[in-house]
Structure formats: structure tokens, C-alpha cells
């Protein structure tokens, strides 16, 4: 028998309040399950709520509830267990983001489809479980857009979910260690073996560092000048994928459109393209989109360091995720603030 739930929508803006209620009804909620308020002071029996979705104005001093709590707004340290939804989304987008966050909490597809639940989830939007090893590439036509830090944050995100993640930096400028606690470089012998294509997988493993996720330590710049890392590492990556020792291999590559890049892109499950919202970056991102070198369905376009108060020159592009600017960003802070959350959910 179907179990009714108490779903409370606490949103001050009437248009969004009604819009979100319509979305819940569209996805199978019964009208008697919904309770709409614009001021939490009018809410009674607070301990019996199954789902509470509130904006910041109605969420001030959030009270304990029995079920799940979602707040539309910025994360605060006061309520670390609350799930936050991004501001500026449509009612349908809020609903889908809420569903996505529940998958992270461990709700299975069987749970979602069980008749005891009071409304339907869109199963097409729930990512499949990983099978074997997956390869994700990241690159950018825009310098200084935060690609490296964002890629490392995604590595940490998956590592915190218990996955074995390997980060590879295939750019000639190996400065990513700036963002790590351990900035030790790989040995000179290893760098020479890689550059001469004499290193095997055992040699590769000897150069692995760990900070929650695994990574190949940076190679000293003067030893790798004029080296073609895409070509050299493609063979290593193919062997690593076959071994399936790592569930996720995250490779950061330079922006290039030659045959070596295409081979690696064809191997990849997804390709992340980072950019920013300013006019120059948007122009370069559009050019990159026109030059896609593998299946277009693989590409995710990420606008990093997004500022709502600045002009968005990417409004006409299909952007996977707008990642808000974070003060004093680090690998840890980007992860803890749920930056790149939607991208991570697609990748998982």
C-alpha cells in the first residue's frame, strides 16, 4: 500500500513556491502530501516532516526534523548535515538536483521505485554505477581558469566516496603540486625513464603519491622539455584501464586537437572542458566546442569561478555546471562546498 509523506515547501517567493509544488505533483506527489508555507513560524508538528525544502529566509535557525532537509542557498557551518541546493535554478532543476543529492546519500534505485514512496523519481537522471576503470580527461582553452584545482577537487570528491582514483597531469608545466600538501617531485631516474619511454607500469607505481586520491608525482621541468606526454602516456593509460586497479583515472591534458589527443579522447568516458564567463574565455570556449574531436556526448562544459553579479557571456552555451567562485579556494574547500557537484554526479 502506498505510504503518504509530509513534504513541506518553505519558500518566501510565491512564484517559486507554487512552481516547485507543481513539479512535485507532476512527479507523482499527492496534493494532500504537500504543505506550502512562507514563514516557518506557522509550521506545527515539526518533528513529523519527511521532506523539508526551504529557502534561506525560511531556513533561519533550522529545526530538527525526522526526514531530509534541503536548503536553497549557500552552505553554512551551522548545519553540516543539511543538503544544499543551488540558487538561481528553475523549479524542475531544483527537484532534479535534490534527487541527485539523495543518490549520494545511498538511496538505491529499488528504494526510489518502491511503491511505499509517495512520488516518482526520474530514473534517467540517476547515474549508473561504475563498471571497471573509467577515464576522464580535463582540459581548457583558457589559461588560469582553475582547471587544475577543479580536477584535483573532483579526484578528492570521488576518493571520499571510497573510490580508488589516480590523477595524471600530462601537461608540460608540472606545477600542480602547489595545490597538494606533499610537493615532492618524482625521482630523476623515473623522469628519464618516462621521457625515453623505458618506464613500465611497475616504474609508474613507484612514482605514485597519495593524498586521499593517488597521483603520479610531478616531473622536473628541465627533464621533460620537448616531450610529448600525450603520446607517451596513452600506452600507460591503456594498460592501467586494462588492469582496473583504479576505478577512476583523471588525466589533465594540454589543449590540442591533433591525432594523439583524439586517440586519448576516444579512450575517455567523458571529457571536461573548463572555462570562465568573461568575454575572452567565452569566445575561446565556443571555439573549443566547434572543434570537438570525439563523440560530442562525451563533453561536459564547466564555467568555473562563476560570479552572479558579473555578465555571463556563456548564456547561449549548454553549460553543464556553473561553479561559484570560492574565496581562498583549495582542494579541500572546493570539495566541502560541493563545488563541481553536478559534474561529479554525471561522472559517477
Image (cartoon, rainbow, N blue to C red):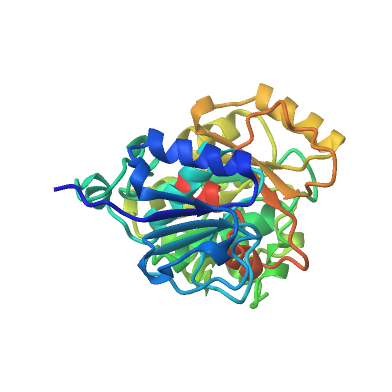
Q: Is residue 149 left or right of residue 29?
A: right
Relative to 6, say whether 262 is above or below: above
Disc count in the image? 0
Q: Position of residue 333 (x, y in %)?
A: 65, 68
Give whichever of 342, 7 is nearer the camera: 7
Instruction: Say which quarter of the image contains residue 54.
Output: bottom right
Relative to 189, say whether 342 is above or below: above
Q: Is residue 76 left or right of residue 3?
A: right
Give whichever of 229, 57 is nearer the camera: 57
Relative to 119, say whether 299 is above or below: above
Q: Position of residue 156 (x, y in %)?
A: 53, 65
Whether residue 165 is visible, yes or no, is yes
Residue at the image point whose x is 59% and y is 28% from the top = 259
Residue at the image point whose x is 63% and y is 30% from the top = 318
Q: Position of residue 29 (x, y in %)?
A: 34, 42
Give whichever of 212, 77 is nearer the camera: 77
Instruction: Say which quarter of the image contains residue 332.
Output: bottom right
Whether residue 268 is visible, yes or no, is no
Relative to 344, say whether 216 is above or below: below
Q: Residue furthest left?
A: 1
Residue at the image point whose x is 53% and y is 63% from the top = 42
Q: Position of residue 75 (x, y in %)?
A: 62, 65
Amino acid at each position: 500500500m502506498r505510504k503518504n509523506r509530509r513534504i513541506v515547501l518553505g519558500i518566501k517567493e510565491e512564484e517559486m513556491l507554487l512552481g516547485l509544488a507543481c513539479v512535485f505533483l507532476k512527479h507523482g506527489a499527492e496534493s494532500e502530501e504537500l504543505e506550502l508555507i512562507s514563514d516557518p513560524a506557522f509550521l506545527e508538528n515539526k518533528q513529523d516532516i519527511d521532506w523539508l525544502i526551504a529557502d534561506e529566509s525560511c531556513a533561519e535557525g533550522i529545526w530538527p526534523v525526522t526526514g531530509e532537509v534541503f536548503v536553497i542557498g549557500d552552505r553554512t557551518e551551522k548545519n553540516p548535515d543539511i543538503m544544499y541546493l543551488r540558487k538561481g535554478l528553475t523549479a524542475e532543476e531544483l527537484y532534479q538536483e535534490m534527487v541527485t543529492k539523495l543518490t549520494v546519500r545511498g538511496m538505491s534505485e529499488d528504494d526510489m521505485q518502491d511503491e511505499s514512496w509517495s512520488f516518482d523519481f526520474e530514473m534517467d537522471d540517476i547515474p549508473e554505477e561504475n563498471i571497471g576503470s573509467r577515464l576522464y580527461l580535463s582540459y581548457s582553452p583558457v589559461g588560469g581558469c582553475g582547471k587544475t584545482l577543479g580536477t584535483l577537487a573532483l579526484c578528492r570528491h570521488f576518493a571520499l566516496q571510497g573510490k580508488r582514483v589516480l590523477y595524471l597531469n600530462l601537461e608540460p608545466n608540472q606545477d600542480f603540486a602547489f595545490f597538494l600538501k606533499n610537493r615532492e617531485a618524482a625521482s630523476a631516474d623515473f623522469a628519464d625513464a618516462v621521457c625515453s619511454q623505458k618506464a613500465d607500469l611497475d616504474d609508474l607505481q613507484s612514482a605514485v603519491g597519495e593524498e586521499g586520491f593517488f597521483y603520479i608525482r610531478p616531473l622536473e621541468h628541465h627533464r621533460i622539455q620537448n616531450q610529448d606526454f600525450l603520446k607517451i602516456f596513452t600506452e600507460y593509460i591503456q594498460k592501467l584501464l586494462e588492469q582496473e586497479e583504479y576505478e577512476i583515472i583523471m588525466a589533465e591534458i594540454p589543449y590540442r586537437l591533433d591525432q594523439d589527443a583524439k586517440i586519448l579522447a576516444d579512450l575517455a568516458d567523458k571529457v571536461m572542458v573548463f572555462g570562465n564567463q568573461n568575454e575572452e574565455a567565452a569566445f575561446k570556449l565556443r571555439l573549443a566546442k566547434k572543434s570537438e574531436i570525439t563523440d560530442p556526448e562525451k563533453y561536459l562544459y564547466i564555467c568555473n569561478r562563476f560570479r552572479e553579479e558579473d555578465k555571463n557571456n556563456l548564456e547561449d552555451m549548454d553549460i553543464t555546471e556553473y561553479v561559484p567562485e570560492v574565496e581562498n579556494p583549495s582542494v579541500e574547500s572546493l570539495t566541502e562546498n560541493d563545488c563541481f557537484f553536478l559534474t561529479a554526479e554525471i561522472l559517477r
